[in-house]
Amino acid sequence: MSKEKVFTGYQLFIIAILAFLQFTIILDFMVLSPLGAQLLQELNINTKQFGMVVSAYAFSAGIAGLLAAGFADRYDRKRLLLFFYVGFIVGTFLCGIAPNFILLLLARIVTGIFGGVIGSILFAIITDLFDMQVRGRVMGFVQMAFAVSQVLGIPVGLYLANIWGWHAPFLLIAGISVLAFIAIAWKMKPVSAHLALQSGHSAMTHLRKTVSQKRYLTGFMATTLLATGGFMLMPFGSAFAVHNLGLTMDQLPLVYMVTGVCAMIAGPLIGRYSDRIGKYNLFVAGTVLTMILVVVYTNLGITPLWVVILLNTVLFVGITSRMISSSALMTAVPEPADRGAFMGVNSSVAQISGGFASALAGIIVVQTPSGMLQHYPTLGYVVVASMIVTIVMMYYINRMVNKKPQPVIEEPVLEPMV
């Protein structure tokens, strides 16, 4: 086995700041789930309206991503990142001061327009700056943002929400996002090597070319299915835990924290392992594990706290394995000149399909007068079915990537700053 490549000081900074930025984006989305039970009561809304709040972000993010995709390869990625991150901070702040359902819905739309594009820019930067052989490790750290949001963000957010109300977590996210913005503006170098590869075609022509290529369409189809699972189960996760599993609101932070700690430890290990055994092999293993846990978890009744924590932990490890391996594999699909556009469209596809999944979940799940959710197992079966199809889709993507020569990143681009 060859010796693993050691990251430079600047590479480590890029990984750290992108992971922190990803943390703020993910936390902004994920915090809605544990706040679900509180929002349903305080805003006097039903499950369909709550599903609209979740899906509003996804739909606006998807539309914005498509509109921006044609321009994604025409600008320095650092400047593009800073522009959309400012919009995300403003949208999150508006969520923090929204007094009712309508204004919260509008604020989520604003947040989605800007925040939904950022993920695609991050992946394009990672693809530009890191070789395929180490992208599993990089994704392991960057996607660790999901786990960190579980460990720190969500418990702190719930704690603040229990004291000062549901607005507090959004204000916290907006505040720490300003710190990430300053670090990127101050330390990050321009990411502009892709500009020399542009053909001079218009943005619409570039977008049309991207969405019409057969190998890209295969990636978009796989992403559609990948987005289904999280968007269907996550929005009602806290309500299901409280009303169906018998947990209290005070126990939820402990569940998220323990699960997140384990996933945070597992993330970098999973990323490193995906580089060793192959991204697709790990994806299949993680998917099978996730399918088993989804069926078990969604069919539970009143359950002891320790069992809920154990099942959540194993489930999240499976989900993390899928996320890291599929993200690393997907970065190898586009040509260097199309990375921004491909990632933008791919992110939009994920957001839009996730929005439909959230809206569908809000229709399928019914909350009884006692608060208990009905038909939650149905969501689990739909998710499992999508995962089975996704294994097949990712097989063809993996075969396509293996046939395609991957460019080697020039080391001088990544020298530490002076």
Image (cartoon, rainbow, N blue to C red):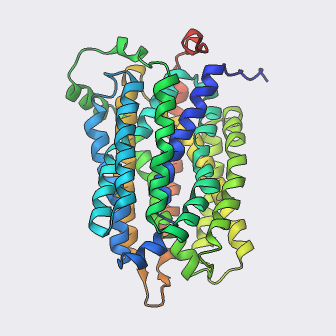
Q: Position of residue 238 (x, y in %)?
A: 54, 71
**Residue farthest to the front?**
164
Q: Is residue 221 left or right of residue 322?
A: left
Please give the name of the residue rendered at 46% of the width and 40% of the height, measured from the top-left corner: 178
Which quadrant would residue 163 be assigned to in this image?
bottom right
Q: Nearer the viewer, residue 16 or 196?
A: 16
Q: Is residue 28 above or below residue 166?
A: above
Q: Position of residue 120 (x, y in %)?
A: 42, 36
* Residue at screen point 35% across, 46% down: 90
Q: Residue furthest top?
A: 412
Residue 349 location (% of width, % of height): 36, 46
Image check: 197 left or right of 302? left
Residue 91 point in image, percent of width and height:
35, 50
What residue appears at the point 54 percent right and 71 percent down from the top-left corner?
Answer: 162
Q: 103 above or below 338?
A: below
Q: How many marks?
A: 0
Q: Can you see residue 404? A: no
In the rendered image, which quarter is residue 74 located in?
top left
Q: From what the image shows, is residue 357 above or below residue 211?
A: below
Image quadrant of residue 244?
A: bottom right
Residue name at image x 47 percent, y 82 percent: 374
User: With respect to residue 31, does 268 lie above or below?
Assistant: above
